[in-house]
Amino acid sequence: MSAGLILTLRETRGLARSNEFVQVGAPLPRGYATRPSELALVTSEDERLPAEIGSATCWPDGSLRWCHFRFIVSIEALGTISLRLERSGDEIPASSSGEDPVTNRSNRLVVSTRDCEFVLDTSEFGLFQEVRHGGSAVITQSRLELETAAGDRAVARVDDISRYTGYTGSGALYSRIEMAGVLTSSRDHAASPATDRFSSSMHFVHLSNAVTCSFRIHNPRPAKHPRGTWDLGDPGAFMLRSLSLNLSVARRDAARWKADQQSDWKPLEQDCLSLYQESSGGNHWNSPNHRNRDNLMPLKIPGFVVERDGEQTTGSRASPALSLNVGGTWLNCAIRRFWQNFPKAIDVRGDTIRLELFPRRFPDLVEIQPGESKTHEFAISLGYRPDELAWLEHPLAVELNSDWLRRSAVLPADGSRPDDSALHEIIRLGLDGEHGFRAKREKVDEYGWRNFGDLYA
């Protein structure tokens, strides 16, 4: 008889992971189970792993076809963990009887994790009103700063909020808070139907005191299509000067930073640090791909610039991490796909951190085309040691055993049979070599906030 589902988790970056949140989807054979509560993930020590297991799709007979699995694991550097799926004779409770970790207090939402309390404003998005760790204030205020091309300051007025908490049999695993609304001038109180919109999602992992955040800006206006074209410079475009999230901390005792995961932590001896990524830093960083609406090349710097303690250095591609010690608590920050989504900047001045999603120093305006949107992602964690936030860029690798995929019969080919050699060769040509997608991406410099993620054919 073929083996059951085996999930193999590998740490590939040489960094020990503590309480890392993992989510993965996996197929089930027809008739294997009818309810997620019948399933359990079991470790190699035959211990049941607390996990949220949910249904994604079902077979025509009503049995589960695809399920999602969410859980927490710790793993040593370059280590491997195997989990197996079992059907339990007893149904596993979906939640505990503990208190809801998300509560309403006046016009605020309060999210309580293992050691932290995050306070969110429900009328205007600014990330956090306050963050406390172990009862002491760490972040005393945070705010969104958005400046339009005309020099107006915009505010993000919330008109919709949703929340969800995922539970295991041991209690709350994570909470997700989603907000959406309109971007209006700080002088205005009403919004027109064509007003630019925003949405945000904050994902709190209760055991690790980590928050993954996304912020999306959307231009809902229709395009004018002058002369039947869909080029930059459309009259319906939303023109931005800058967009940043500013965090004020209670008292900074020490600070460390690194330009990428391969670098060592460097102390910040004085008050200031600025790391600004203007272009991709690749061989074709000033590719015509980056010309603006006036057919001009705005990029001037091939890569990034660091200004620290009165000194300036340069480099090609940065994926920075920042850790500030605030009264014994380390506050850790990082922006996902930092250099790939240039321009980006991270800035420290005294007791203020600026996560610059569209930096003001960029030598051009940001043009959000009609119908276009852009999502920025970043992460914050609090704890008793500096954290590289490696999981933001390099989550644990998860593999499913191929015999289970064959048994599930949900894919036309699983890639493990000898007669798939021709398919393997086509895939290899597409990924590797001078004509592969990665090489083509470098040739045209398919990077920057608008281009990254596209595949150049």
Image: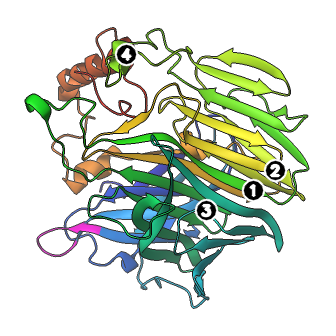
Residue 380: assigned label:
none
Estimate the x, y position of residue 92 in percent, counting from the top left. Answer: 46, 82
The Cα atoms of the two marked residues, 2 and 4, are separated by 38 Å
* In-image side of 14 versus 24 (left or right): right
The residue under label 2 is: 351
Q: Name the front one of labels 2 and 4.
A: 4
The Cα atoms of the two marked residues, 1 and 2, are separated by 6 Å
Q: Name the front one of labels 3 and 1.
A: 1
Residues marked 1 and 2 touching at CB (< 8 Å): yes
**What residue lies at 45% left-to-right and 65% top-to-bottom?**
188
Estimate the x, y position of residue 258 in percent, counting from the top left. Answer: 73, 32
**Type of amino acid under label 2:** Asp
**What residue lies at 70% left-to-right and 42% top-to-bottom?**
388
Q: How many marks?
A: 4
Secondary structure beneath dot 2 equals loop
Say few, some or many: other residues with alpha carbon within 10 Å of mark 3 (under 14 / 14 to 19 / 20 or more).
Answer: few
**Type of amino acid under label 4:** Leu
46 or 304: nearer the eye? 304
When the figure is inspected, residue 99 is found, relative to residue 310, above or below; the finding is below
Secondary structure beneath dot 1 equals strand
Mark 4 or 1, nearer chain start: 1
Residue 296: assigned label:
4
Estimate the x, y position of residue 76 in percent, counting from the top left. Answer: 69, 45
Mark 3 or 2, nearer chain start: 3
Mark 2 or 4, nearer chain start: 4
Mark 3 or 1, nearer chain start: 3
The residue under label 1 is: 248
User: Image quadrant for the N terminus?
Assistant: bottom left
432 or 238: nearer the eye? 238
What stretch of residues is rendered in magenta? Answer: 56-63
* In-image side of 317 versus 405 (left or right): right
